[in-house]
């Protein structure tokens, strides 16, 4: 299983954003492109992938929407279609209590949980990886199924988040010399995994 | 300079498609994501990149929209913003005569020209590359500035187009074992180039 956690610090959690103006919803366009990159090849869905999107923008943070490739149905790779799923999840999850999780539709769940709680939970049986230009080149490490890749939005991960990850013994990995959007980083990570199969 | 030609066989050329339903405009969503991948890093525009999008869908094909990173201004990476540029180009270029080209806005031109004519023109002083799973691994070739990468839409390049490219002595290259959208392929090609800098 390939697993990602995307920290979208400003992405709106109120279930009333405008599907046709995703930029204004805390750069929800970036989130949608990351979902698209995580699950779509040109002729298939990546059933071996999980993406946890942490939305920390107003008005009901924190929310985590978890997409599981092995049970996603009827999903399309364009931004508006994916944003429709996110909106549906935020509507259903609006009144969740802390750490409660519910099903939204096939392959989509929403919980009210913090990024830190989610990451700590994963760290109990998985190896945390985060992208950092001082990290080891991804081409030089042996990729394993129990890795969880942690990504920021276009601002990257905040310094305090990196410190938090360091305390959990997360590994720093770099993908190249250029600072990329999370949707691009996911493509590169998938390509590395694809080459090991 | 990194140059790409994207053959979008069904992408609409009538300047009246719905910005909020890009899938129905001959999969214009794929085209928009390819433009986004070609030019955006998380904190910069790729000024060293040219992308030629060949639109061959109804009602006024063929049209080629050429985006030049070194003069693009005020462009955003989301699908709808990019589709707005394409719509503007198709409006301005609606009545172009064959092989005529006009400026649309900074860094964007449109011409009425066929894919074949465009590719032949490029082949006079550039090396044509196309993606094919029987090609040489991109990691094993020396990347050069005079390469032009030719990409298809989600259906790939038609067989007859591959034969046409073979006659022009184009080189086959593969990016990995999985069939990808052009927007994903562009990310992988950029990453290879980025690693040579």
Image (tube, coloured by chain):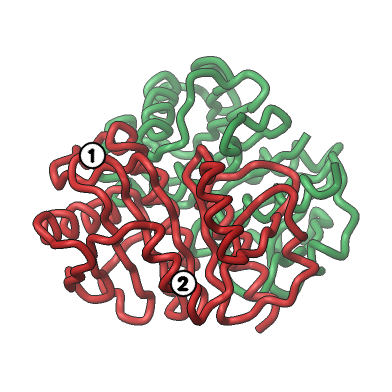
Chain colours: A red, B green
Location of mark 1 (residue):
A58
Visible in this render: residue B183? no
Residue B192, position as x, y percentages in the image: 77, 53
For numbered disc 2, what is the local secondary structure? Answer: loop
Q: Residues within 10 Å of mark 2 (few under 14, many from 20)?
A: few
The foreground one among B77 and A155 is A155
The foreground one among B48 and A55 is A55
The reply to whether the C-beta atoms of the residues labelled 1 and 2 are less than 8 Å apart is no
Q: Is residue B85 above or below residue B164?
A: above
Taking the spot 37% from the left edge, 81% from the top edge, the residue there is A70
User: Which label is found at residue A30?
Assistant: none
Taking the spot 72% from the left edge, 67% from the top edge, the residue there is B174
Where, by quadrant of the figure, is residue B134 drawn? bottom right
Location of mark 2 (residue):
A43
Residue B98, position as x, y percentages in the image: 55, 28
**Of the residues tagged 1 and 2, which is closer to the observer?**
1
């Amino acid at each position: 299983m390939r697993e990602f956690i995307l920290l979208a610090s400003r992405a709106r959690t109120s279930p009333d954003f405008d599907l046709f103006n995703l930029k204004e919803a805390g750069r929800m366009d970036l989130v949608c492109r990351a979902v698209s990159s995580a699950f779509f090849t040109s002729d298939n869905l990546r059933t071996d992938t999980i993406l946890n999107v942490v939305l920390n923008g107003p008005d009901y943070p924190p929310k985590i929407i978890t997409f599981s490739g092995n049970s996603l149905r009827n999903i399309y790779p364009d931004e508006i279609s994916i944003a429709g799923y996110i909106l549906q999840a935020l509507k259903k999850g609006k009144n969740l209590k802390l750490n409660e999780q519910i099903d939204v539709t096939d392959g989509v769940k929403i919980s009210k949980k913090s990024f830190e709680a989610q990451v700590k939970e994963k760290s109990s049986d998985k190896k945390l990886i985060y992208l950092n230009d001082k990290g080891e080149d991804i081409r030089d490490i042996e990729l394993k199924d129990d890795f969880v890749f942690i990504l920021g939005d276009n601002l990257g991960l905040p310094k305090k988040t990196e410190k938090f990850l360091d305390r959990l013994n997360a590994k720093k990995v770099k993908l190249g010399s250029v600072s990329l959007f999370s949707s691009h980083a996911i493509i590169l990570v998938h390509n590395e995994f694809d080459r090991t199969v």
